[in-house]
Image (tube, rainbow, N blue to C red):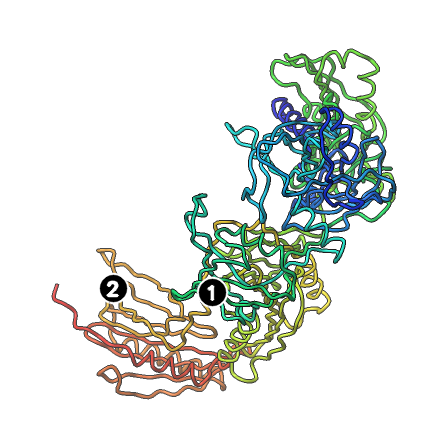
Amino acid sequence: MSRWRLRLVRAVFAAALLLGSTGMSAYAADTGTGSGSIPDIVQKTTSSVVAIIGKPTDSGTSKSWQGSRYDLAHGTGVIVRSEGYIVTNAHVVKDMRNLLVVTADGKSYNGKTTHYDEESDLALVKIEASGLPAASFASAFDIRVGEPVMAIGTPLSFTLRNSVSSGIVSGMERSVQSKYQLIQTDAAINPGNSGGALVNMKGQVIGINTMKYVEYGVDSLGFAIPVDTVQYVLDQFFKYGKVKRPYLGLELGESWESVVGLPTDNGLEVTYVEPDSPAAKAGVKQGDILQSVGSTNTHTLVAFNEALKKVLPGETVRLGLKSEGLLKNIDVVAEEDHSSGTELVQAADGTYIDDDQGKTQIGDSHFGWSMKYSAGLIKANQSENGNQVVFIDAKGEYAIQIAIQEKQSLNLSPFSLMRKVGADYGDTVLEKRFVEQTPYSYAKLIAKTEDGEYYETRAFQKEDQIYSITLYIHDEANYEKAFKRNSYLDVLDSFVLAFDPDASAMKDISVFQNQTTITSEYGISFDLPSEWKEFGYGKELSFSSKDGEQTLDVRVTSASSGDTLKDWVSRQESMIKETYVDGYFTVDGPKETAAGGVSALEARYETTMGDKWRVDRHIYLIKDKLKYDFQFNYPKSAKSEDIDGVVDGVLKSLQFSKEALNASIGFIQDEDDLRDKQRTVTYSSTKYPYSLQVPEVWSWSSNSVYDDYGYGENYKTFSFIGGSLGVTADDSTKLEDVLSKTEKEYKKNAETDADYVYESTQEELFGTTVQKYALKYKTKSVPYTSEEYLFQNGDVVYTLKLRINDAVKTEEQWQRIQTAIRSLTFEEKSAQ
């Protein structure tokens, strides 16, 4: 690794260490009056504020990017009950495990998230403690714009916990990337302050800090969740264990004025009504304008959500609507919204925040090396195939790079191995020699750069691989201090070409693993076996096993208004039944199942063309107006346990993420919903004067033969499942020659194969006499019907050739084909 790149890694890592992650005995309002000095207020409130630190869950698709023991996330929390309940932001703990909570007096407790609500961005963390100082909450009616406030939290670094910043309430009822209203403040809120307290001059909490705007030229723009929303969520947490939200089944759109922030009397347009939803049952229709919920006017989505805070599932809510120009009130019985539930990944009780605790050795089981794993050593980077890895010291004093060169010549001489180590141009060589030792000798180089950095490289050979390990010491003063230099060399000297998989103290960083995580801009992620690969042209989510026998296609389209999962699956089943002849397919399902916490339907369609059977196993689900079809295709003869393992792995690992969903995704039409088997389109040749009407669901392809002017095509194919119809036009031959050649081919095949029985007849078609060959045959156990029509029109010889497998030769399909053949028409060629 070049030195400039190493310095870049050091700088990025240092920034990461600094930033980290952004992360009521009764919680009734405190009505105390009066105010004291700021130090008195801080002393009164800061004891109720805690710091939360933990391990971020690995969201990467490659093991090479898994974090180290210093890869930590942190945020802030507020004690709301003395027996150890702490409120914080949901985004603080969402991707955090091995929680550790540190109180203002410096005591540490293992924590666990017990309640979680992503919609409000609030969560509860529980620690085993009692007698904790619970915070006092202000009344929502007492909060005023302009009043002084302080933000207490853990900005930037965990070492800065319980920091205090001051400012004022800059605004109320703000709608900023939130489902509910927020408080705006100019008190400094930095990464790590999330989940902390925004307090007034009485020492009362008026909000939970949640976010700030970070952009060049933007200053002092922070936001907090107001106390009324906090109390609403906490009430439901403690009563029901979750937030029980009402579900009406509406998708709403804001007016242009609302989007840009202009005052408006315009309501919310109903853009979608879920079928069988409470709103649908009450008569709400797409295109209606929602004016009010109860007594609350609803000009914005935030106002709509605020109004629903007063409604529990099972209660009746009155909606004021403008429908077809008329104002009316509709009573809707709310159901419960189950769409916002989220499962958190957290370590079991008793695990350590340092999940490398007890690991004193580190290495790679695949490449077979290991070395000492000192407490300050951090894996900063690793190549995708694991053949290069960079470690840096937590203090930034040194770095170690290990690189493996594969497929080298065996048994290199000391001279050849010495050539594997060399100083960069302009560096001063301090030592270079070959070191004999057992079991592996090595070439050694020590050099100094013009910038005063020192590095030592050692090159070993093991079979056909060269292992290079380089120690970089960034500060010349540290190299000159013997005790410092020796501590670095202690790690370097511990490097060996061996890996003990049974050693409990060994940490394995091999990137080779059993699963690969697939992510998509459609807001989904799931795991597949690592040997599965992406395949296909233009297919975004298509994968196959190593041998290509098993495939997965994920098809994403939009759900039309009023469509249901059951209706969608029924249409898919009908398509199979309409395509295949009885005896060539089976249908199993649909059966209720679940995927990613979402209700789904599973159906299996087994089909064959007469030889081998294949299975299409579909998992259908609808989430957030998108339809997801997971189609697994595999031979019926495949081992069921292997297939079940892949399918179960995908379904159990499937996750939906609103953050990962591309916000630019609009309506994706499901073409199957527009499919009309009876509709035809006209194809007209660009050179030869013929036209043909074929079903629009057929696909087209052509083989072109160009004349001197670059025009013309002599062969066109129209394909469908299990067959095709081809048209050949040839103006360079005679009809009698084509007939003679074709007749010879049929006779030859019949003479060599007794099952090859064809019929030759003449028919009057297309305004002329046509020679027709009809054949029923079987190739590799696939029975099919073939018809071939040969004739001449003008100076062009035409051949129409039809082939259709018996498996799909339904009466309806056969009639469509015959209609398409007989639709062939000709026009007189214009004089040139």
Q: How far across and how far down the image is residue 814, in percent?
A: 41, 83
Residue found 30% across the figure and 66% down from its top? 714
Residue carrying label 2: 686
Q: Residue 670, labelled with which disc?
A: 1
Residue 815 in sight in this render: yes
Closer to the eye: label 1 or 2 = 1
Left or right, 333 with reference to 254: right
Identity of the residue furthest to the front in this view? 33
Nearer-the-camera pick, 130 or 823: 130
Q: Is residue 460 above or below residue 795?
A: above
Q: Nearer the viewer, residue 671 or 42?
A: 42
The residue tagged with tag 2: helix, strand or loop? loop
- Near mark 2 (Cα within 10 A), the count class, few <14, some 14-19 or many ≥20, is few
Of the pair 75 and 682, the residue shown nearer to us = 75
Residue 676 found in image quarter:
bottom left
- Residue 727 vs 313, above or below: the answer is below
Residue under the point 71% across and 29% down: 35
Q: Answer few, some or many: residues within 10 Å of disc 1's Cα (few below 14, many 20 plus, some between 14 and 19).
A: some
Q: Quadrant of residue 45?
A: top right
The earlier-in-sequence mark between 1 and 2 is 1
* Rendering coords of residue 726 (x, y %): 36, 72
